[in-house]
Structure formats: C-alpha cells, structure tokens
Image (cartoon, helix red, strand yellow):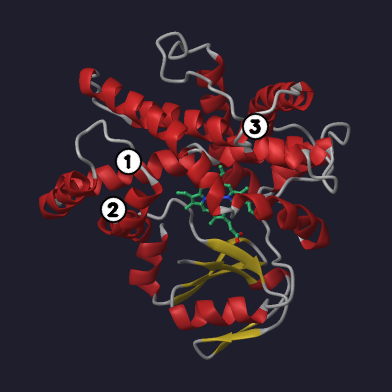
Amino acid sequence: MNGLSKLKRYGHLVREEIVPGESVVWVFRPEDIAKIFKAEAGLHPKRRSHLALLKYRTDRSNIYNNGGLISTNGTEWWRLRREFQKVLSKPQNVIDYLEDTDLVVQEFVRLCSHEKADDFLSLFSRLFLELTCLVVFDIKMQSLSEKERHQNSRSSRLINAAFTTNSAILKLDNGPMLWRFFETPLYKKMRRAQNYMEEVALEMVTQKNQDTSICGKQSLLEQYLKNETLDIKDIVGMACDMLLAGVDTTTYTTAFALYHLAKNTDAQEKLRSEATALLKDRTSPITPETLKNATFTKAVLKETFRMNPISVGIGRILQTDVVLSGYRVPRGKDGYVIVTI
Ligand code: HEM
C-alpha cells in the first residue's frame, strides 16, 4: 500500500509493523514533519536504509572507507557530506556545465523526433546517465549513440546495474535480512550489479586522477580529487553513489512530468508559451537567465514531485521522543519514522 492509500485509509499518522517488533510511523501532517526535523537540529540525522549496500561496501575495505553518503550515519557521514556539499551546492557548477548539458538535451530532442517509441523510459535513462557522467566525471559516455544503445554496452550495463540495485534495496532492507549470514539470491544480484558499477567508477576516477590537462571548468570529480581532506576511497564511494542515485530518480520524475502534461493540456500550453517566450527558436541556447525566468517550468517540476514523489519519503530514527498529533513516538529502534514530503 502506498503512502497516499495509507493516508486516505488510516489518517495522517500511521504506525505499521512489517517486521514484528519493528514499528514504522508514517507522518503526513506538515506540523508533525516540522517537529521531527526540529528535534534533530544540531544532531546528525540517523537513518536506516541501504543496509545491504552498507555491508557490500564495508566488506570491501580495500575500495571503500564506509558505506558512502546514502547509508552512513553520524560523524563519518558528516565528514563526507560537509566536503561533498561544498561543491554540489555551488550555483557556478550549474552555470559552467549549462552549455554542455544543453547540447546533450538537444541531441536527445533530435533523437526523440525520429524515434517512434511506445515507451520513452529507456531513452530517459540514457539521457540522465549521460548528464550525470558529464557533470560528475566530465566524461561523454555517448549514451544516446547507436553503438551505446546496444544491450551489452557500458551505458546499458550501468543503467541496468543502477536499476537492479535500486530495485533490490527496499526488499533487502526489510524482512529477516538473511543476507547478513549467507549470500541470498537477491543479495548476489545486487552484489554483481555493484561489482560492475564499481569497476566503471574506479576506471573513471583513476583516469581523472592521472589526467594533468588544465581545463577552464572543473567537474565535481576534479574538485573532489583536489580536496586534501578526502581520499581516493571516499571519492570512489561518491562516484558510485552518484551513478546509483542519478539515473532512476530523474528518469521516473521526467516520465511522471510528461504524463501529467499529456493529461493536462492547459498546463502543457502554458509551458509551451513560457518556452517560446524565453527561447527565440528551438535551437536557442539555455542560459542562466533562461533558467531564472522559467518560473512555470519550475512549478511543473515541483507539482510533479508532489503528485508522484519517487522516494517513499525521508526516513529517520528518532533521537529523542517526539509528540506527533498527540501521540508520543519513542526514540530509538521503535521510533523509525518515514516523513512524507
Ligand atoms: C528526482 C530527483 C531526486 C529525488 C526526489 C531524490 C531524493 C532523495 C532523498 C529523499 C534522499 C534522502 C535524504 C535524507 O535522508 O535526508 C536522497 C539522498 C541522496 N541523493 Fe537524491 N534524489 C534525487 C536525485 C538525485 C540525483 C540526481 C543524485 C546524484 C546525481 C542524488 C544523490 C543523492 C545522494 C548522494 C544522497 C545521499 C545524501 C546524504 O545522505 O547526505 N539524488 N535523495
């Protein structure tokens, strides 16, 4: 049952026990959500997800220092997050890559105009893998090319590896977690997918680390390699996190956005008018000014996130007891809450 069905059936605060003895509380009221975030102010957020990925990476301490950003908690998470977000949140990085990302999107639009696909999902995955690798590694994968669209190509295998891992994560996190004791078939599937992703990430990081050429703009990877507080294992973990998180999230969100636009012709027309007002013709470049003024486009994206969030929510283990809608939710193991935003 998804979040919306739980809300409709049981109300704005729902306690669920999938694994006996382990409660998950679903929180839907904005006031309750605010209380949860206020309660963790000044503390590191405590999360419980991607546990099998955490095992996979901690078992391979020759390659990784930890489980990476997604599965790590506490001071080790903050050590990574502090450094990674300095670069990720710089608007200049978006501006530096605008021309290159625009070229990729134009190639994608050209391809869509002669491609008569019933389902564009796989093309979206190619688009977002290309954009992720461009911005993170400064590498052109050519994911949209005929050659790469072959099922055994590097881009096809990376897209499959991300999808296989993401599809396994929730199932491996819940239930009896037998993979802690022996290799279950699902854990094996995830391990193989991660082996491939890691192989490509290692190759890209090593290549960039040896590259001494100087270029005006710097990819995220180049900026991280220059950061003396990070080592190569931190950076390989980050590279894998980006490959894992960058494709399906954006692919499904775009698919939902187009679905809603197809069903809402008024919104579609308004979006088209905004685009034609901001761009002289269909090949006009996207500039920082275009992005600043694309207010309706941004609203469409936000509305898509609201209507079809691709994540079940934001998960937290409470670090103090919190009273939500008159109910005391205790801290600790029994207080795992999913905040749905
Ligand atoms: C539709 C787009 C996306 C959505 C809705 C989304 C959603 C989320 C959510 C809900 C979290 C958990 C946050 C928390 O626990 O506080 C998260 C974490 C993360 N996401 Fe995304 N994501 C998206 C796209 C991306 C992309 C494109 C990348 C990278 C290329 C990415 C990389 C990450 C990473 C590295 C984390 C872990 C951050 C940390 O623990 O500090 N995400 N994302």
Work out whether mark 1 precedes mark 3 in sequence or the reverse, and give the earlier one: 3
**Can residue 72 be seen in the rendering of this structure?**
no
Contact? badges 1 and 3 (CB < 8 Å): no
Which kind of residue does numbered mark 3 sit on? Met
Label placed on residue 297? 2
Work out whether mark 1 precedes mark 2 in sequence or the reverse, and give the earlier one: 1
Residue where numbered disc 3 is placed = 190
Could you tell me residue 83's position as x and y percent? 74, 53
Residue where numbered disc 1 is placed = 255
247 or 210, nearer to the observer = 210
> From the viewer's perspective, is the residue at label 2 or at label 3 nearer?
2
Could you tell me residue 67's position as x and y percent? 76, 45
Work out whether mark 2 precedes mark 3 in sequence or the reverse, and give the earlier one: 3
Label placed on residue 18? none
Tell me the residue at 72%/26% (across/down): 208
Contact? badges 1 and 2 (CB < 8 Å): no
The CA span between labels 1 and 3 is 25 Å
**Can residue 37 be seen in the rendering of this structure?**
yes
